[in-house]
Amino acid sequence: MDAFREKLEQYAELVVKVGVNIQKGQVLHLQSPIEAAEFARLVVQKAYEAGAKYVEVEWEDEASTRLRYEYASEDTFDYYPAFKAEALEKLAEGGGAVMHIKVPDPELYRGLPSSRVARATKAAAAARKGYQQFVRSNRLSWCLIKAPTRAWANKVFADLPEEERIDAMWDTIFRMNRVGEGNAVENWRSHIETLKVMQGKLNDKKYKSLHYRAPGTDLKVELAQDHLWLGGGDTTESGVYFVANMPTEEVYTMPNRTGVNGTVTSTMPLNLNGRLVERLSLTFENGRVVHYDAQSGREHLESLLDTDEGAKYLGEVALVPFDSPISRLNRVFYNTGIDENASCHFALGSCYPVNMQGGTELSQNELLARGGNSSLTHVDFMVGSDQLDIDGELPDGSIEPVFRAGRWTI
């Protein structure tokens, strides 16, 4: 077996055994771009070898997706097939698992009306609301992973000869997922333990608020009462440990919905499902966005904020040191699932109830009353840099540094 094939096998085994952590007799739903078919088939094989009862593959074709926005009637963009949402809910109810090779082309919707994409995105989110409750409450194991596509590799590695870009992307995916040096599964178990140590330190601190300062940023974020920091992976209601994002370098928690004040400016481009927003700026008053702007893609940011009322509030606070392994690659990936692990970030929209003690047992109104946020959307945007300082307010009101120049101080 050549070196590349060996790494590919390791990676497929990793996402099956550590990512979704397939259990004997479990059903897996795998979403994959057509371009990633060879790797997707290897994942299918590894899932069956791990004991999966059935693997359903849903193929995605971005060229066909774009054709809809070019040629479909204007009155069709509020439609989403109910049977697709119902199938995912049934899968979750039956104890299934979901894996998504998520690598949207950053330029997919260039030149198309932003309103069409926004309407279709909102319709999909509304139809899948029930399924998302399973996801955000850890009632099923799920995992987002990466594999190269030509469009993505061309964007990220535009500085390389075209014939080298796919190979460069595979090499980078292996590196950021700790594949190729020893046993990848064991490497990940060690990495998760490291994140758990930092998670424990932050939970012991019980910070009341975090104050962010950087060029273009002066933001105070209160944390929800009884908030919990998480990192690495999560455990389903049935006791299965899974890693939702591969790679992952973050520890994250729940902000107080109405306790965010000040201005924050992003430090990396945001890929909104094929629509780029660069250098976005948000000003908050009592948690709500009251002013927004962007160097480019402002109309896409506007459509995100107009998803619903909850889209104008934060649902997640995540800390990642500027010297994380992905940050040290010194490259923008135009993919939130990767870029968020190179940078501190926030998320507009829905919170994760698991980030609050007893949060998964609360109704939506109870969660809101305790500082959580509810929305059809959840979109991360990056704010970290080597110029970011963060101070933490302790329970007694004293202040201590948490980050200096983008790095941990605790």
Image (cartoon, rainbow, N blue to C red):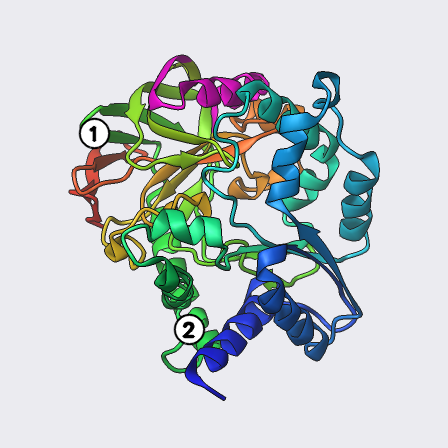
The front one of 232 and 295 is 295
Residue 117 place in picture, x, y as percent: 59, 26
| Quadrant in the picture for residue 385 | top left
Instruction: Look at the image and say whether residue 215 sits in the magenta stretch.
Output: no
Residue 74 place in picture, x, y as percent: 70, 17
Instruction: Look at the image and say whether residue 307 sits in the magenta stretch.
Output: yes
In the image, residue 269 above or below residue 171:
above
Question: Counting other residues with Cα less than 10 Å from the Cα at mark 2, is it few (<14), some (14-19), or many (20 or more)?
Answer: many
Furthest-top residue in this view: 290
- At mark 2, the secondary structure is loop
Question: Counting other residues with Cα less than 10 Å from the Cα at mark 1, is it few (<14), some (14-19), or many (20 or more)?
Answer: many
For disc 1, the marked residue is 213
The front one of 196 and 37 is 37
Q: What stretch of residues is rendered in magenta?
A: 290-314
Q: Which amino acid does label 2 sit on?
A: Val
Q: In this view, does 267 lie to the left or right of 44?
A: left
| Quadrant in the picture for residue 237 | bottom right
For disc 2, the marked residue is 179
The front one of 298 and 318 is 298
Q: Is residue 322 left or right of residue 96?
A: left
Q: Which amino acid does label 1 sit on?
A: Arg
Q: Can residue 402 be seen in this view?
A: yes
Q: Residue at x 50, y 89 (%)?
A: 1
Q: How far apart are marks 2 and 1 (CA)?
A: 36 Å
| Quadrant in the picture for residue 244 | bottom right
Lower position in the chain sequence, tag 2 or tag 1: 2
The front one of 196 and 147 is 147
In the image, residue 22 above or below residue 67:
below
Badge number at residue 350: none
- At mark 1, the secondary structure is strand
Q: Residue at x 40, y 43 (%)?
A: 334
